[in-house]
Amino acid sequence: MIEPSHPVAMMLAADRRYKLQAYVFVFEALNYADGVLHLGRKPGGEDADESDRHLTGQQLCEAIRLYALEQFGLMAKCVFNSWGVRTTGDFGEIVFNLIRIKQMKKTSQDRREDFDDVFDFDQLQSDFQIAMPENK
C-alpha cells in the first residue's frame, strides 16, 4: 500500500484516470528498457551515469510494448484497459504526470506528443507469438 502522503498517492487522488498499476508498470518498463533492452545507454554500449540515461517517448513505448507482451501475453490490451490506458498517448499522460510531481525527469526536447500513436493496442495480439518446444 502506498502512503497517502507520497506524491504518487496525492496525484492519484487528484487525477483518477489511471490506476496505480499503470504508474508502477511504467517504472517497471523503464527498468526493462535499461536492464534487458539496454536502452538509455551511451552510444557504443558504455553504461551512462544515472543523470545521462534517457529514453525518448517512442523508446519507452517500445519497452512498454515488449514488456507487456512478456508479462501479459495476449491479455496485454485487456490489462492496459483495466488500468484506464487505451492508447500509447495515455502512457504519455502517465509519464508527464510523474514528471509534474518530480518522480521522473525530462529533457527540453521531450514532449507529451512523443507518445501519441506509437503502436496500436489491437496490434499487441498479433505481435504475440507462442513458441513451441523443439522435439528432440
Image (cartoon, grey):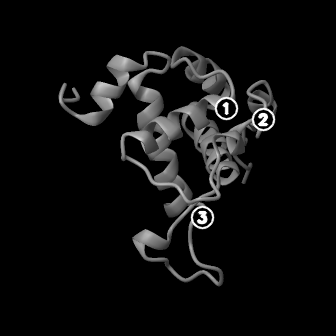
Is disc 2 placed on a helix, strand or loop? loop
Q: Residues within 10 Å of mark 2 (few under 14, many from 20)?
A: few
Q: Quadrant of the C terminus?
A: bottom right
Mark closest to the chain's N terminus, 2 or 1: 1
The reply to whether discs 1 and 3 touch (Cβ–Cβ < 8 Å) is no
Label 3 sits on what residue type? Leu
Write down the residue under mark 1.
89
Tag 1: amino acid: Gly
Can you identify the residue that label 2 sits on?
117
- Discs 2, 1 touching: Cβ within 8 Å: yes
- Looking at the image, residue 20 sits to the left or right of residue 106; the answer is left
How many marks the image carries: the answer is 3
- Separation of residues labelled 1 and 3 (CA atoms): 20 Å
Secondary structure beneath disc 3?
A: loop
Please provide percent x and percent y for residue 126: 81, 31
Which residue bears the numbered disc 3?
39
The spot of residue 102 in percent (x, y) is 36, 47
Query: Disc 1 on helix, strand or loop?
Result: helix
Residue 64's tag is none
